[in-house]
Image (cartoon, grey):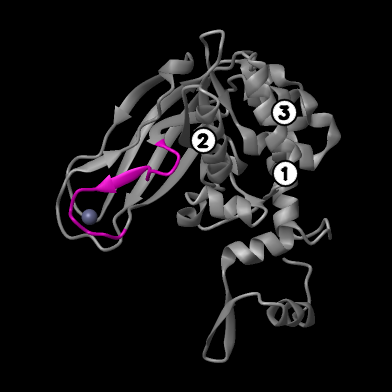
Amino acid sequence: MLGCASAELDVLVDAGLPFEERAGVRHFDPNDLYNLGMYSGRTTTQPELAFRMLFRFTRRPVEELLRRKSWSFRLRLECPECAGPAPWHVAEPDVARFGGGLADVTAPAAGAGRAAYAATVTTTGARTPLVSPALRALVADYLGAGHRWQMLPVAMQADFRLVHALGATSCVAASLLLADRFRGAGFEAEARRGWFCGVLGGALDLPHACVEVLDEDGVLKSIDIAKAQLAARLSADTEEFRELCLGSIHNKAIPSTASANAPLARHACGSRVPVEVRSDIRAVR
Ligand SMILES: [Zn+2]
């Protein structure tokens, strides 16, 4: 899966790759292993193959991404160390701001342990590229800085200064940094968590975030900075999609009501262990 022999792992361990030894077996962090495969340059590792398949759509004409589209949207919530029955709080899809809609909502009733949220979410696209030269310059600076997108533990992604100081980035960290820079330049901006849809039939569930900023033309723009960066890494002919990521709205993104470093769901039972959220989002045919 990693295109990597055991001897190569030994070299990395000697260079500081962390692991825990349990019963004589080395256990690595799954994020580390994913990044190892992703940046191995082998082209055949599982993370590289998954990434290419996931981003195939970025090479197609973008008109497809501007149409109205409906999604069967389902979240499974689990409170791993639940302290008892209590209400659930879910950061719902927040699509009306961008011309979308929410229907057939089944919100979880108060209870313990596990719950589900379901809805039909309609998204749409619109070409609303960033117009402010100041905002465009901040985005270009960021994209030119060469931060390397990595899988990172969710809690670490919120510490965007640390992540970028290490030369790394992620959807959440990049969105938080850019929102901070936009605000520093005098714009109203907020990084929001959300979902990226239609990915391998809902099988891959990556933390996702975008930056929303009020542009100087008075229009709320959405910047999916990490997608622009990843598409550029995939191939040069993704230019149209990358431009769409810089201010426009596309139908594969569902913003939530949560800010980028907030959880998507919580359970009011009093447990300090965060709720686990698994999303399953499929196109309605
Ligand atoms: Zn609970």
Task: Label 3: state its secondary structure.
Answer: helix
User: Which label was assigned to residue 180?
Assistant: 2
The quarter holding residue 242 reads top right
User: Counting residues from the N terminus, which is met first, the one under dot 1 or under dot 2?
Assistant: 1
Main SS type for the magenta part?
Answer: loop
In 3D space, how far apart are the residues under numbered discs 1 and 2 (Cα atoms)?
Answer: 32 Å
Under mark 1, the amino acid is Met
User: Counting residues from the N terminus, which is met first, the one under dot 1 or under dot 3?
Assistant: 1
Q: Nearer the viewer, mark 1 or mark 3?
A: 3
* Residue 96 locus on image (x, y percent): 41, 17
The residue tagged 1 is 53
Near-viewer residue (223 or 182): 182
User: Which label was assigned to residue 242?
Assistant: 3
Task: Label 1: state its secondary structure.
Answer: helix
**Quadrant of the image containing the N terminus:** bottom right
Does residue 209 belong to the magenta stretch? no
Q: Which residues are magenta?
A: 259-273
**Quadrant of the image containing the C terminus:** top right
Under mark 3, the amino acid is Arg
* Residue 79 locus on image (x, y percent): 29, 56
